[in-house]
């Protein structure tokens, strides 16, 4: 087994598995020779699934492929994610869709952030205008032309709830191959719950809408519920 940062973990240079980080992968994968049997702990283009804008792009592409090859009925099985736009590049298309259904709730998510950071809900285009003006740049981009990308999705207003609270399931899967697809599902996992009961009466209260944010930050008055019930094995 090689070290986490490079290919020099074994003295004789022979190894079967390299536990590398994403930074090493980006810098070295295309310039390193590996034997056929060698494995590393990341796929080279992992960001095609981990970045929200690219995941949506691939889901839409897959749905179109299914429709072309198997028909609309088969493609309809991919209708499990809401209407999504990448901003700012698809802003005109988003505005057109937004105006078709006034009053609906939408959610904004940064394409490459996690733990609920940067997420907010809105019902008025004015909120997007304020975002474009004040909040669409990362701290290190304030003086540059580069703008942080977001996805805007139609918010699911009637989600599945447990005891009136939003939840998600943390499931661990090891994917060893995509072509053909081979995945190993770990038997244990856990559920995470939001800090307070779900309601859209106040879309600014993230402890109603997020399961992770309040668990990490402890900002909700019912934070103890989030901690004591968020690790329920299934």
Image (cartoon, grey):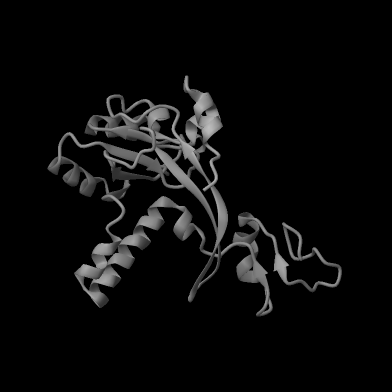
Horizontal side, residue 133 vs residue 27: left or right? left
- 172 lies above or below 151: below
Judge by depth and name the residue closer to the eye, 132 or 3. Answer: 3
Horizontal side, residue 34 vs residue 219: left or right? right
Answer whether residue 141 is visible to the viewer in this image: no
Q: Tell me how many marks there are.
A: 0
Q: Residue at x 21, y 68 (%)?
A: 73
Q: Residue furthest bottom?
A: 36
Q: Position of residue 185 (x, y in %)?
A: 54, 61
Judge by depth and name the residue closer to the eye, 158 or 10. Answer: 158
Q: Position of residue 168 (x, y in %)?
A: 44, 43
Locate residue 211: give its quadrant: top left
Q: Residue furthest right?
A: 11
Q: Residue at x 48, y 43 (%)?
A: 113
- 95 lies above or below 125: below
Judge by depth and name the residue closer to the eye, 31 or 85. Answer: 85
Q: Residue furthest top?
A: 221
Task: Identify the image quadrant of the N terminus.
Answer: bottom right
Answer whether residue 42 is visible to the viewer in this image: yes
Q: Residue at x 25, y 69 (%)?
A: 74
Q: Position of residue 216 (x, y in %)?
A: 55, 32
Horizontal side, residue 7 vs residue 81: left or right? right
Q: Residue at x 39, y 41 (%)?
A: 109
Q: Position of residue 204 (x, y in %)?
A: 35, 26
């Amino acid at each position: 087994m090689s070290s986490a940062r490079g290919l020099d973990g074994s003295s004789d240079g022979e190894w079967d598995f390299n536990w590398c980080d994403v930074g090493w992968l980006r810098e070295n994968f295309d310039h390193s020779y590996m034997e056929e049997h060698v494995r590393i702990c990341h796929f080279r283009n992992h960001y095609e699934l981990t970045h929200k804008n690219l995941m949506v792009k691939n889901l839409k592409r897959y749905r179109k492929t299914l429709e072309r090859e198997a028909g609309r009925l088969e493609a309809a099985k991919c209708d499990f994610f809401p209407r999504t736009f990448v901003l700012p590049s698809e802003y005109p298309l988003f505005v057109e869709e937004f105006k078709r259904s006034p009053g609906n709730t939408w959610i904004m998510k940064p394409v490459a952030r996690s733990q609920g950071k940067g997420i907010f809900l809105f019902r008025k285009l004015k909120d997007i205008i304020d975002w474009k003006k004040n909040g669409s740049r990362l701290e290190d981009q304030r003086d540059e032309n580069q703008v942080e990308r977001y996805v805007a999705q139609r918010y699911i207003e009637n989600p599945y709830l447990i005891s009136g609270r939003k939840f998600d399931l943390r499931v661990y899967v090891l994917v060893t191959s995509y072509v053909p697809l081979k995945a190993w599902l770990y038997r244990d996992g856990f559920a995470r719950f939001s800090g307070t009961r779900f309601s859209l009466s106040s879309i600014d209260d993230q402890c109603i809408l997020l399961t992770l944010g309040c668990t990490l930050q402890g900002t909700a008055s019912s934070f103890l519920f989030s901690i004591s019930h968020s690790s329920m094995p299934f």
